[in-house]
Image (cartoon, rainbow, N blue to C red):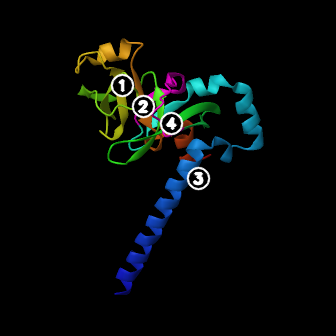
Amino acid sequence: MMHQWSLWRLVKQLETLIIIMQYISFVLLFYPAAYQPVEGCAAAAEEGATSSVATLILCRACGHELAVGADIHFVPSQLALSSRNDTSIGGRKVNIQLFENPHGHQFEVITFRKADVTQHWPADKHFSWFPGFAWTVATCPRCKTHLGWAFQPSDWPDTITKTKFDESAHTFLALITHRLLREDFASSLLMTPKSFMS
């Protein structure tokens, strides 16, 4: 009985720790200054666009490399419930838009010119957050997690090739912010065990 109680208590502590880590990772994803020393913030400001261009964006679920900071391309929509700038990618201001689907679920998204995702055609012209564009679901090619949506002009055929989508200047992706992770932040969470250090 005592063993079960100890195990239950350990599980509850681990659940609490996971919730705290999720909150910390969310805060640090969108507020990089929260974990940079003052000198690091100044250096990041001086580097400017170079650090944001090189920042890798990963799938939060499996770590698959999806895009780089240079792939971010703001596409405004008058259907967004709200729009805000945030310094989430290497100190660069990134526009984040809030949308709501017909079921009442809200999503904060960042728009990308390109990303390594799997699109699931046919595209749907109904309930598009970007007038004049049809959408299709975009998932991680490794773990199949729903990452957001791919948008193509609504006058295109419902099903196109990935090559046509990737090569067109008229296509873009809207990826859900809390399903993304910056590589530099993920790397900061990893530690080398003391026994491996010299």
Residue ID for mark 1: 151
Going from N to C along the chain, the mark reached first, 1 or 4, is 4
Q: Position of residue 92 (x, y in %)?
A: 63, 30
Q: CA distance from mark 3 to mark 4?
A: 43 Å
Going from N to C along the chain, the mark reached first, 2 or 3, is 2
Amino acid on which disc 4 is placed: Gln
Residue ID for mark 4: 97
Going from N to C along the chain, the mark reached first, 2 or 4, is 4
Please give the range of residues in magenta.
64-82
Q: Which one is in front in this view, the residue at disc 3 or the one at disc 1?
A: 1
Circles 2 and 4: CB atoms closer than 8 Å? yes
Amino acid on which disc 3 is placed: Lys
Going from N to C along the chain, the mark reached first, 3 or 4, is 4
Circles 2 and 3: CB atoms closer than 8 Å? no
Spot the residue most to the bottom. 1
Q: 2 and 172: which one is in front?
A: 172
Q: Which one is in front in this view, the residue at disc 3 or the one at disc 4?
A: 4
Q: Is residue 24 above or below residue 134?
A: below
Judged from the image, the secondary structure of the residue bearing numbered disc 1 is strand
Task: Judge whether residue 163 can be spotted in this image.
Answer: yes
Q: CA distance from mark 1 to mark 2?
A: 8 Å
Amino acid on which disc 1 is placed: Phe
Quadrant showing the N terminus: bottom left
Residue ID for mark 3: 194
